[in-house]
Amino acid sequence: MPHAFIPSTLADPALQVTLAPANAPGREVIRILVIGSAHGVERIIHELYRLGFAEVREWSTPQPTGRSHEIMRVLTRYVMVE
């Protein structure tokens, strides 16, 4: 199986993402969506967990998209506005 290249840090410090607590002033809400079959969405979320991107519990519960056999889950993060 091919492995994706995911750097642990970005070479340019200006591109580093700083996560902020939900109640921090000067923060911006960022939402990441995963849309597809229930099985596919769960596989992606668990793969992202394995890579250290997000805990499985941080994602929303499955929501319908209006399309047959399709769901979406949302991850909300807060980043500092520069």
Image (spheres, rainbow, N blue to C red):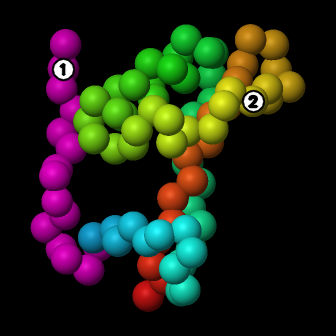
When asked about the image quadrant of residue 17, the answer is bottom left
Number of residues whose C-alpha sits closer than 10 Å to that of mark 1, classed few (under 14), some (14–19) or many (20 or more): few
* Residue 74 image offset from top left, x and y in percent: 61, 42
**Identity of the residue drawn at 44% across and 88% down:** 82
Q: Disc 1 marks which amino acid?
A: Pro
Is 45 or 24 nearer to us in this picture? 24
Residue segment shown in magenta: 1-15
Is 60 or 64 nearer to us in this picture? 60
**Identity of the residue drawn at 53% across and 86% down:** 26
Q: Is residue 22 above or below residue 59?
A: below
Q: Which mark is residue 16?
A: none
**Identity of the residue drawn at 52% across and 80% down:** 24
Q: Is residue 75 above or below residue 9?
A: above
Q: Earlier in the sequence, mark 1 or mark 2?
A: 1
When asked about the image quadrant of residue 23, the answer is bottom right
Residues at badges 1 and 2 in contact (C-beta under 8 Å)?
no
Asked which secondary structure carries label 1, the reply is: loop
* Residue 59 image offset from top left, x and y in percent: 55, 39
Residue 22 falls within the magenta-colored stretch: no
Q: Disc 2 marks which amino acid?
A: Gln
Number of residues whose C-alpha sits closer than 10 Å to that of mark 2, classed few (under 14), some (14–19) or many (20 or more): few
User: How much space separates mark 1 and mark 2, taking CA atoms?
Assistant: 31 Å
* Residue 33 image offset from top left, x and y in percent: 60, 42
Left or right relative to 13: residue 70: right
Q: Which mark is residue 63?
A: 2
Quadrant placement of the N terminus:
top left
**What residue does disc 1 label?**
2
Count the labels in the image: 2
Asked which secondary structure carries label 2, the reply is: strand
